[in-house]
């Protein structure tokens, strides 16, 4: 009798366990399916948008600080229009907010600046750049990525692609141009000006024949203020504002914090008052095998070091297209597939909503290898710090500049 009761309990427990595991399995599969479905719908909508690539040719002299670029970002790229108006349009129609690309490119040492934008925003973007950077020349350009043929095994080309992310929460800002004092450099002689971004431009300009490097910033407006709430909580934790009274200590006073914590709080609070963007940063280096240099890859990994701060935030490489050990890839089979995917994703500017094709390789690199498209929230100040035009303090011939100024003919010119 007792044994039969035990067996009955075991059977009941086994049935309940099987039911629970079945529910968990179905839920996981359903979530994976919906993520993939939404990703597909968003990519399908994204592929219907007509884009144009604009090349920015710099004037000989740029006297504006990165603050001018910050104004451009606020007025030209922060758009609430064009996004999903209903849940149906977002989750069934796949509609998203407008996505733009800011691109810094080196083709054999020739450094270029590009903006990739939906056609409908082209005029506004041009107007904002002309307003802040007199003398700049903007023109439609052919897609430089098409100059590199699709990756084929044995083609004699090698590439590495990196994705970047923040080391801490989004609310912690990186070291910006204001921290470097660049907002106070107006009126200074060019040789007195400091711009940490010049190191990156010089690195790009050092590329030789058969080498290219593409750095892409994928940006769109960040309308969700969740990151601001996290920032407020961080400030409360640092200052002790979130401490509650107790029986032993009925009154709570703000704790004494160090000078470093005071600076951190000030930086976070300043950041919370600025416009935010959802940003993803990717970089690709491709070269002929006989010209490929791993030092370029190290340069890509460390190119944001000047803007990193131990007390605040840092930008670090999150994923790269290679393998750490030879045994992970038998006869370079997976490396080739990763190269094909990396080049195509960079060429198609696939970020934020990744379209996985559903193959076993997509499953492998997404869920096993950790292939992802990390994003972060950066303010307009931080974004202007990472993407702005070098002044004359950078005399590198790798940055092409317009030597002559364009001007209107005199009003009294005889006909």
Image (cartoon, rainbow, N blue to C red):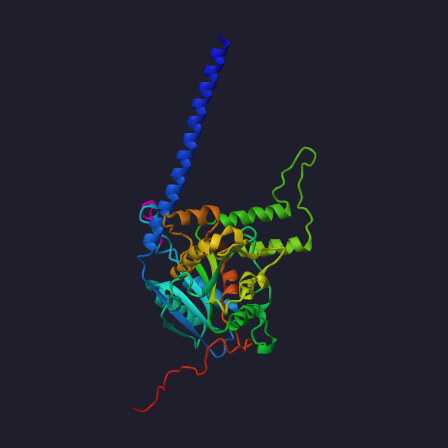
Residue 182, by quadrant, is bottom right
Q: Residue at the far front: name it.
A: 331
In the image, residue 198 sits, relative to residue 409, either above or below, namely above
Residue 373, horizontal then vertical, whole percent = 46, 53
Give the number of callouts.
0
In the rendered image, residue 276 lying in the magenta stretch gets the answer no
Residue 156, horizontal then vertical, whole percent = 44, 66
Q: Is residue 406 left or right of residue 260?
A: left
In the image, residue 72 sits, relative to residue 59, either above or below, namely above
Residue 288, horizontal then vertical, whole percent = 46, 68
Q: Which residue occupies 64% across, 37% down? A: 245
Q: Residue at the far left: name it.
A: 415
In the rendered image, residue 87 lying in the magenta stretch gets the answer yes
Residue 358, horizontal then vertical, whole percent = 37, 47
Q: Which residue is at the front of the view, 393 or 285?
A: 285
Instruction: Using the rendered image of the protein, determine whether residue 301 is visible from the camera's viewpoint.
Output: yes
In the image, residue 53 sits, relative to residue 10, either above or below, namely below
Q: Is residue 163 left or right of residue 51?
A: right
Q: Residue at the far top: name it.
A: 1
Q: Is residue 251 left or right of residue 304?
A: right
Image quadrant for the C terminus? bottom left
Q: Which residues are magenta?
A: 83-89
Instruction: Using the rendered image of the protein, determine whether residue 170 is visible from the camera's viewpoint.
Output: no
Q: Which residue occupies 51% across, 51% down? A: 328
Q: Which residue is at the front of the view, 306 or 263?
A: 306
Q: Residue at the far bottom: name it.
A: 414
Q: Which residue is at the front of the view, 167 or 150?
A: 150
Q: Which residue occupies 56% across, 46% down? A: 233
């Amino acid at each position: 009798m007792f044994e039969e009761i035990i067996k009955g309990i075991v059977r009941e427990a086994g049935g309940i366990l099987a039911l629970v595991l079945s529910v968990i399995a179905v839920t996981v599969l359903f979530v994976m399916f919906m993520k993939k479905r939404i990703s597909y719908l968003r990519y399908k909508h994204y592929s219907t948008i007509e884009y144009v690539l604009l090349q920015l040719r710099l004037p000989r002299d740029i006297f504006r600080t990165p603050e001018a670029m910050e104004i451009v970002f606020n007025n030209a790229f922060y758009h609430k229009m064009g996004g999903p108006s209903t849940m149906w349009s977002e989750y069934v129609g796949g509609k998203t907010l407008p996505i733009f690309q800011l691109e810094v490119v080196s083709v054999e040492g020739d450094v270029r600046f590009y903006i990739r934008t939906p056609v409908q925003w082209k005029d506004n973007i041009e107007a904002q750049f002309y307003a802040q950077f007199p003398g700049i020349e903007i023109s439609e350009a052919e897609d430089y990525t098409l100059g590199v043929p699709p990756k084929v095994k044995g083609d004699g080309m090698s590439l590495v692609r990196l994705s970047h992310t923040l080391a801490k929460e989004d609310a912690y800002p990186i070291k910006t141009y204001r921290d470097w004092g660049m907002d106070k450099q107006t009126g200074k002689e060019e040789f007195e000006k400091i711009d940490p971004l010049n190191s990156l431009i010089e690195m790009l300009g050092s590329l030789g024949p058969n080498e290219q490097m593409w750095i892409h910033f994928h940006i769109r407006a960040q309308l969700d203020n969740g990151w601001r709430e996290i920032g407020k909580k961080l400030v409360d934790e640092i200052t002790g504002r979130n401490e509650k009274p107790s029986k032993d200590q009925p009154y709570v006073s703000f704790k004494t914090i160090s000078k470093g914590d005071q600076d951190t709080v000030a930086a976070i609070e300043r950041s919370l008052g600025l416009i935010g963007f959802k940003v993803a940063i990717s970089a690709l280096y491709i070269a002929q095998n006989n010209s490929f240099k791993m030092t370029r890859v190290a340069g890509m990994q460390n190119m944001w070091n000047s803007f990193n701060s131990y007390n605040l935030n840092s930008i670090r490489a999150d994923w790269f297209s290679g393998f750490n050990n030879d045994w992970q890839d038998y006869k370079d089979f997976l490396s080739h597939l990763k190269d094909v995917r990396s080049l195509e994703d960079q060429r198609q500017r696939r970020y934020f909503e990744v379209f996985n094709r559903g193959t076993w390789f997509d499953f492998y690199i997404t869920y096993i290898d950790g292939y992802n498209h990390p994003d972060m929230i950066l303010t307009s100040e931080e974004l202007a710090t990472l993407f702005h035009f070098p002044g004359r303090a950078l005399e590198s011939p790798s940055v092409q500049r317009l030597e002559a100024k364009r001007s209107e003919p005199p009003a009294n010119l005889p006909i």
